[in-house]
Image (cartoon, rainbow, N blue to C red):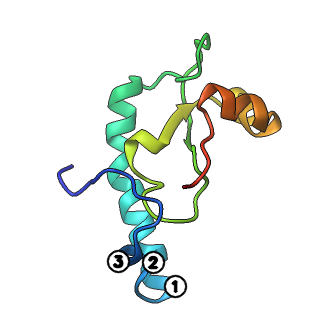
Amino acid sequence: MTGLVEPNLKDPDRAQGTQQQRHNQFLRDFEDAKPIVSARSKEWCEVEGCDHKAVVYHHKAGRKGTGVNHPDMLLHACDSCHRAIHASPSMSFALGYMVRRT
């Protein structure tokens, strides 16, 4: 997907438009990123040490803001690991499964 750019979580140009336009763009960007993340993960959970099939696309920086759908900001995970990521945020930040917005 050639339309993807490096993540910039504070890009004022991307914040323009109505709420519905921003939501629609979010969905388009997310759909564009999914095949890239799936190819990278080969459909397996990307959490270190896990050998389950991936079923969830986890947003490392949450789902608000710009750049959050860049493939580098997404993690393909199984349900169990995805729940663990959200249940243990301090460990997830330390391991890079969650990142703070800049």
Identified at 60% across, 43% down, the residue is 99
Give the CA separation, mark 1 to mark 3: 14 Å
- From the image, tell me which residue sits under label 1: 19
Q: Residue at x 21, y 57 (%)?
A: 3
Amino acid type assigned to the residue bearing label 2 in the image: Arg
Q: Residue at x 38, y 23 (%)?
A: 42
Q: Vertical placement of 95 versus 4: above or below?
A: above
Q: Which label sits in the foreground, 1 or 3?
A: 3
**Mark 1 neighbour density, 10 Å: few (under 14) some (14–19) many (20 or more):** few
**Residue occupied by mark 3:** 13
**What residue is rendered at 38% in x and 52% in y?**
7
The secondary structure type at the circle numbered 2 is helix
Counting from the top left corner in percent of width and height, residue 69 is at 44, 53
Q: Which residue lies most toward the front here?
A: 102
Q: Amino acid at mark 1?
A: Gln
Is label 2 in contact with label 1 (beta carbons under 8 Å)?
yes
Q: Quadrant of residue 78?
A: top right
Front tag of 2 and 3:
3
Q: Are marks 2 and 3 in contact (CB under 8 Å)?
A: no
Callout 3 amino acid: Asp
Element at label 3? helix
Tell me residue 58's x, y (percent): 58, 42
The disc placed on residue 22 is 2
